Amino acid sequence: MEIEKLKKEILCVDSLLVLTGAGVSQESGIPTFRGKDGLWKNYDATQLATPHAFERDPKLVWEWYNWRRGKILNAEPNSAHYGIKKLEEIIPEFLLATQNVDDLHRTAGSKNILELHGNIFRTRCTGCGKIEFEKKIFDEEELPPGCKECGSLLRPDVVWFGEPLDQLVISKVMEFALKCSAVLVVGTSAVVYPAASIPYYVKEKGGRVFEINMEPTPVSGIADISILGRAGETFEKMMQDTG
Ligand code: OAD
Ligand code: ZN
């Protein structure tokens, strides 16, 4: 069976990169971005996560992020988050690169995490650049929030479409991708770059590529083992007797 095969291989690798996307948090009740799940009040989520949308209507964009904050604060990590944390304890060299902004990997206890797309609980001032982290939901009348220091508009400290990723973060991930022996890609549609390019770098350097997703993705074509299934359920089976 494919899960057994994956388990056998993955528990033996000496350095593992795990790349996660919204599918990892789906079983925690957090909507993904694409597909019917990605709709909010008839808006396509990918149309809201843009600098243009924020310029046009900061309140609307903030309402969506505030709604997501609420969903996340009511959610708990699932077996996929905990399974990934367990892998970190077992595998000598480990890095988790997540596209998720929901902080659930940290809540589950993962340590070596790089957040490619930022964190939804951080705000960044569009004026003075001040960054703050607070796990809270804003009151409706606070939206869009302003900076206490300079009065400018605060924005979620996440990466929007058309914006560059933090150079330091992406270069650390790439450095690891080029030297690791395997990458496990979980719950991402693998269409948003540069995150989506990571499995290809690993493959090119002779590393193994593993994937867990409910549907085939562009990564499935280069994957050595591809599991079609829900991430939480798959990890539950895979990590059963690992302590
Ligand atoms: P998407 O919404 O594009 O894709 C979610 C993926 O998870 C799909 O491939 C689903 O098949 C899969 N999936 C859904 N539920 C699953 C489950 N329970 N178990 C396993 N797989 C499941 O989300 P991302 O790939 O994370 O970026 O999207 C990438 C980026 O696009 C996001 O970080 C965000 C978004 O716009 C920015 O905001 C910059
Ligand atoms: Zn400010």
Image (cartoon, rainbow, N blue to C red):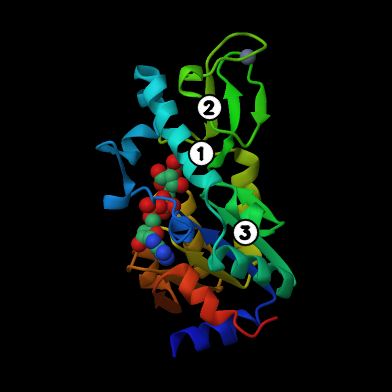
The correct choice, above or below, for 2 with respect to 118 in the image is below
The amino acid type of the residue labelled 3 equals Leu
Left/right placement of residue 176 relative to residue 54 reads: right
Which residue is identified by label 2? 138
Quick one: SS at disc 3? strand
Q: Position of residue 147 (x, y in %)?
A: 61, 15
Which residue is depicted at the point 24% across and 37% down? 42
Quick one: SS at disc 2? loop
The correct choice, above or below, for 137 with respect to 30 in the image is above
Q: Is residue 161 visible?
A: yes
Left/right placement of residue 141 relative to residue 13 reads: left
Which residue is depicted at the point 48% across and 60% down? 24
Question: Mark 3 and mark 2: span between their CA atoms?
Answer: 29 Å
Which residue is identified by label 1? 69
Q: Quadrant of the C terminus?
A: bottom right
Q: Earlier in the sequence, mark 1 or mark 3?
A: 1
Tell me, for residue 96, which label it has, or none. 3
Q: Nearer the viewer, mark 3 or mark 2?
A: 2
Residues at marks 2 and 1 touching, judged by CB atoms closer than 8 Å: yes
Residue 11: image quadrant is bottom right
Quick one: SS at disc 1? helix
Q: Position of residue 110 (x, y in %)?
A: 68, 59
Q: Earlier in the sequence, mark 2 or mark 1?
A: 1
The amino acid type of the residue labelled 2 equals Phe
CA neighbours of label 1 inside 10 A, class few (<14), some (14 to 19), many (20+): many
Which residue is depicted at the point 40% across and 34% down? 49
